[in-house]
Image: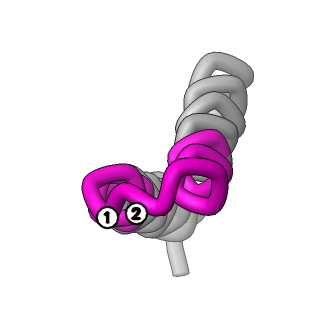
Amino acid sequence: MLLFRWLVMLLLFVAALCFAFYAGTGQARYKRLGFVVLKWTMIAAGVFFAVLILERGI
């Protein structure tokens, strides 16, 4: 669980870094990359929480 938390935090940091690069350079590829990383981070977090809920037994 701790590993997953660190991974999510790292991915959120990478997305923020991409958006910062976009703000600094104005290159659209950094914005696209930031959104892709953010999207997959949210999908992974959703799957993680779904597994936790199913594991608990609704």
**Residue 40 relative to residue 12: left or right:** left
Q: Nearer the viewer, residue 40 or 29?
A: 29
Label pair 2/1, CB-CB below 8 angstroms: yes
In the image, what residue occupies the spot 36% across and 56% down?
A: 27
Nearer to us: label 2 or label 1: 1
In the image, what residue occupies the spot 38% across and 51% down?
A: 30
**Residue 39 relative to residue 3: left or right:** left
Q: Is residue 40 visible?
A: no
In the image, what residue occupies the spot 47% across and 61% down?
A: 26
Give neighbour class at mark 2: few <14, some 14-19, many 20+ (Cα, 10 Å): many
Return the x and y of residue 21 as percentages of the image width and height.
57, 45
Q: Quadrant of residue 9?
A: top right
Per the rendering, the mark at residue 31 is: 2
Q: Where, quadrant-wise, is the N terminus in this rendering?
A: top right
Task: Judge whether 29 appears above or below 7 on screen.
Answer: below
Return the x and y of residue 52 as percentages of the image width and height.
55, 57
Task: Report the predominant secondary structure element of the magenta stretch.
Answer: helix
Per the rendering, the mark at residue 28 is: 1
In the image, what residue occupies the spot 31% across and 64% down?
A: 28
Task: Judge whether 55 appears above or below 58 on screen.
Answer: above
Q: Which residues are magenta?
A: 17-36
Return the x and y of residue 50 as percentages of the image width and height.
44, 68
Q: Is residue 57 visible?
A: yes
